Amino acid sequence: MKLYVIGTILCVFGIIVSITMTLYGLWQLDVICKGPVWNQCSQNIGFYQWLLNEGYSRYSDYPFMSSELWITTTGRAYDTLMAIISMAPFILSASLGFLLYNERKEVKKLRKMLNYK
C-alpha cells in the first residue's frame, strides 16, 4: 500500500511539473518574441537600430534575464525554452502512463481480495 501511495504522489508531481514547464516556457517565449513578431515594422526598425547602436548585430546575441539565477542570451534562452516545452509532453505521458498502470494494478488487487472473501 505504501508503494502505491508513493507512486501516485510521484505521478501527480510529474503531471504538475510538466504543466508548469509548458506554461513557463510559453510565457518566456512570449516575452522573447512579442516585440519582433507583433510590433509594427516602424517600431521594430527602431528596436533593431537601438540594438546595433548597443553593439549587437543580432537579436539572439542580446542578453536575456528571466531571473537572477538564469542570465543568458536571447538565442540560448529561446533554444532552452523550446527544449523545455518539447520535453514536457514526454514527462506528462510517462506520468499518466505510470499512474494508469499503478491504478489498474491496485484495482486488480482489490478485485482479487473481494472475490476471495
Image (cartoon, rainbow, N blue to C red):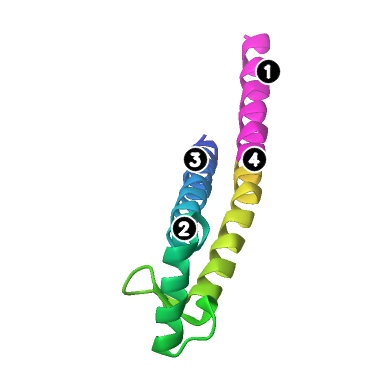
Task: Nearest to the eye among marks 1 and 4: give it.
Answer: 4
Residue occupied by mark 1: 112
Q: Earlier in the sequence, mark 2 or mark 1?
A: 2
Whether pointer 2 and pointer 4 mark residues with C-beta atoms closer than 8 Å, the reply is no
Residue at (33, 69) in percent of width and height:
67
Q: Which residue is mark 4?
A: 98
Q: Is residue 110 above or below residue 95?
A: above
Is residue 100 found inside the magenta-colored segment of the image?
A: yes
> Which residue is disc 2 drawn over?
40
Look at the numbered disc 4 and give the secondary structure of its residue: helix
Under mark 1, the amino acid is: Lys
Nearer-N-terminus badge (1/4): 4
Name the N-terminal-most of marks 3 and 4: 3
- Which residue is at 61% across, 27% downward? 106
Label 1: element kind: helix
Q: How far apart in space, not on screen, are marks 3 and 4 (Cα)?
A: 10 Å
Which mark is on residue 12?
3
Please state which of the two labelled residues, at mark 2 or mark 1, is closer to the viewer.
Answer: 2
Q: In the visual, does 84 lie left or right of 101?
A: left
Q: Mark 3 or 1 closer to N-term?
A: 3
The magenta segment is: 96-117
Report helix, strand or loop for mark 3: helix
For the residue pair 107 and 39, the one nearer the viewer reads as 39
Q: Are marks 3 and 4 in contact (CB under 8 Å)?
A: no
Magenta stretch secondary structure, dominant: helix
The residue depicted at 44 percent of the width and 90 percent of the height is 55
Q: CA distance from mark 2 to mark 1?
A: 67 Å
